[in-house]
Each structure stands twice: as structure tokens, then as C-alpha cells.
Image: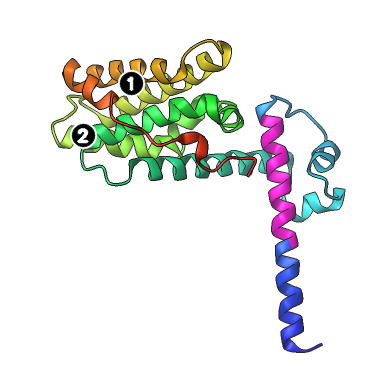
Amino acid sequence: MSEARAASARERGERRRAQTRTALVRAAQQLLAEDRTAVPVLEITQLADVGMGSFYNHFSSKEELFTAAVDDALELQGALLDAATEGFEDPAEAFAHSFRVVGRVHRVQPRLSRVLLSRGPELIAADRGLAPRARRDIAAAIEAGRFTLADADIGLLVAGGTAMTLGQALHDDPTIDDAAYTDRVTRELLVMFGLAPAEADRICALPLPDVASGAHLDD
């Protein structure tokens, strides 16, 4: 076999391997969203439409797969937030923008939301997704005199807990106007963090990107 043909064969093999891993991660995300993680590996591979042996070529256990599934969702959430806050110079505005986007994602991207909510409080300390971006913006807003909080970590605990509670509330009651409700919650957070009510109102009225048109777990 020529070097070119061998290289082409390796590339095809790498693509198939990547496709298999993605299929397994997507299957795990579906199970997380449905709160069905106590399933055998065979069911996961059937859902992913891959062979049983393929599972252990990529993951040593279900726990490792589910961790990878959450990490993938966090990466997607982070990409959405980075795109939504690009160009903001005011960290208070950036924080509010991120929080308002995350609130809307719960309704327009329910699988992404449910995968993240499945991990509960541990997401507040995650090193990907909303948590590190929220802490960065809160710390910058404190430094700039925009927020009067004494500690960025306390602000992150408040914001993270509020984000999870908000997401669950939106799932529990589909009649809630997710956009209006999220903006009201964001406004109260901003006031709690030290902004004047009128300033909080202004920030929460800023236009947002269409989060429904961003990348989805199903893509």
C-alpha cells in the first residue's frame, strides 16, 4: 500500500473513531436529559447504534462516559456565552448578558439544559461553562467598582445557585415566560450585587442574540 493510501486509510479510521465517540456521548446526553443513567452499557451502545466492543475502545466505564457527556455540554454552553458576550467592555453588562442567555437556553435548548442540571451543585465549581465566566465577570465588576460584593466567590455561589433554581423552575412550569422571568431574576441579582435599580433595568433591556440559532447537542 502506498503512503498516500495508508494515510487516507488512517484518516478514515480516525473519522470513524471520532464519529463513534460522538455517538456514545450523544447517547449519554440523551440519557442524562431523561434521568436514565442506571442503564447497562449494552443499552447505551444500542442507543448510539454502535457495537458493544466500541464502548471500551473509548471509555473505561459508564461514569467516564457520563462525565465526558457533561464536559461536552459545558463546552457548548461556554461557546454560546463567549459568542453572546463578545465585545462587552463593562463586566457588569457581560455578566448580565451571560445570565440572561443561560436562562433562555433552559427553554429553547432543553436537552443542553437538562444535561447540565443533572449534575446539580457541582456545576457551580466547574471549570467550564457558565461558572468560570461568571466568576471572571463578577471579579472584574468588583474591581471596576460596578459591584459592591466583598468576594467574587460569594457572588458565584449566589449566581450559580440562582441559575440552577431558575432552570428547574422553567422546566417545572412551561407556562412561565422564560425571557421575562429570566430578566427579572437577572435584574434582582444585579441590584443585590450593588447596581442601582435603574441601571439594572437598563442592562436587562439590552438586546440579546438568538440563542435558538446557536449550536445544539443534537447538531
**Identity, as a three-letter code, of the amino acid under mark 1:** Thr
Magenta stretch, residue numbers? 16-32
Q: Secondary structure at mark 2?
A: helix
Distance from the alpha carbon under mark 2 to that under mark 1: 15 Å
* Residue 67 seen in the current view: yes
Q: Is residue 103 magenta?
A: no
In this view, the residue in front, 201 or 19, is 201
| Location of residue 207 in the rendering, given as x and y in whole percent from the top left corner | 32, 31
Q: Quadrant of the N terminus?
A: bottom right
Picture disc at residue 141: 2
The residue wearing badge 1 is 186
Residue at 67% over, 30% down: 32
Q: Residues within 10 Å of mark 1 (few under 14, many from 20)?
A: many
* Residue 128 seen in the current view: no
Q: Quadrant of residue 181?
A: top left
Q: Residue furthest left?
A: 145
Q: Quadrant of residue 94?
A: top left
